[in-house]
Image: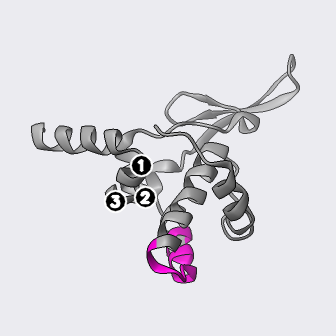
Amino acid sequence: MAGFETKIIDMWSPIVDKHLVIKNNYFKYLTCHYFHFLSNRKGDISEDILEFKDKISNLLSYKKEIKKEYINILTGRKEFLLEDGTIFEPSSIDFFLTTEQLVEIFGIEFITSLDPTLSRDFKINQIIN
């Protein structure tokens, strides 16, 4: 994926922090770039920000049930056993999304503007499957 632009992140982070409170830095940076993309196309994106907030709040596939809670005595951090058997540590929340997940959340137009190669590969896979 193409790199993130610091200028865009600096410009949009206060809005993302205020309205969305995203702890995952990777997703936050993507969201900053997404809002910049929308702003360049539309101008006023206040409605889009609210719609995006609702959208990510209601995507159930990204919500995981916590089965057990642990404390790692070596690191002093809390860890959670999730329903899918993975161990999740909130302090290391950065995870990366697949192309399909990116398209589901942000749409193909934004992904194309961010990384045309990623978009092309996604479209080819859609045709093949």
Q: Give the SS element for disc 3.
A: helix
- Residue 72 in magenta? no
Q: Dot 1 surroundings within 10 Å: few (below 14), some, or many (20 or more)?
A: some
Please identify the dominant SS of the magenta region.
Answer: helix
Mark 1 = which residue? Answer: 102
Residue 70, horizontal then vertical, whole percent: 76, 29
Image marks 1 and 2: residues in contact by CB distance under 8 Å? yes
**Quadrant in which the C terminus is drawn:** top left
Q: Is residue 101 placed above or below 40 in the rendered structure? A: above
The local crowd at label 2, few if under 14, some if 14 to 19, many if 20 or more residues have their Cα within 10 Å, is: some
Answer left or right for 7 relative to 84.
Answer: right
Count of numbered circles on the image: 3
Q: Residue furthest top?
A: 74
| Horizontal and vertical percent position of residue 1 | 46, 37
Along the line of sight, the residue nearer the viewer: 36 or 68:
36
Please identify, in this view, whether the residue under mark 3 or under mark 2 is nearer the observer.
3
Residue wearing tag 2: 106
- Horizontally, residue 78 falls left or right of residue 81, namely right
Q: Which residues are magenta?
A: 41-53
Residue 85 percent location from the top left of the image: 53, 28
Circle 2: residue type = Phe
Label 1 element class: helix
The residue depicted at 75 percent of the width and 65 percent of the height is 14
Q: CA distance from mark 1 to mark 2?
A: 6 Å
Residue highlighted by disc 3: 109
Q: What's the residue at 54%, 45% (across, down)?
A: 64
Quarter of the figure with residue 21: bottom right
Say if 81 sits above or below 22 in the image. Answer: above
* Nearer to us in this view, 12 or 76: 12
- Classify residue 53 by image quadrant: bottom right
Q: Which residue is at a point 50% across and 75% down the rendered structure image?
A: 51
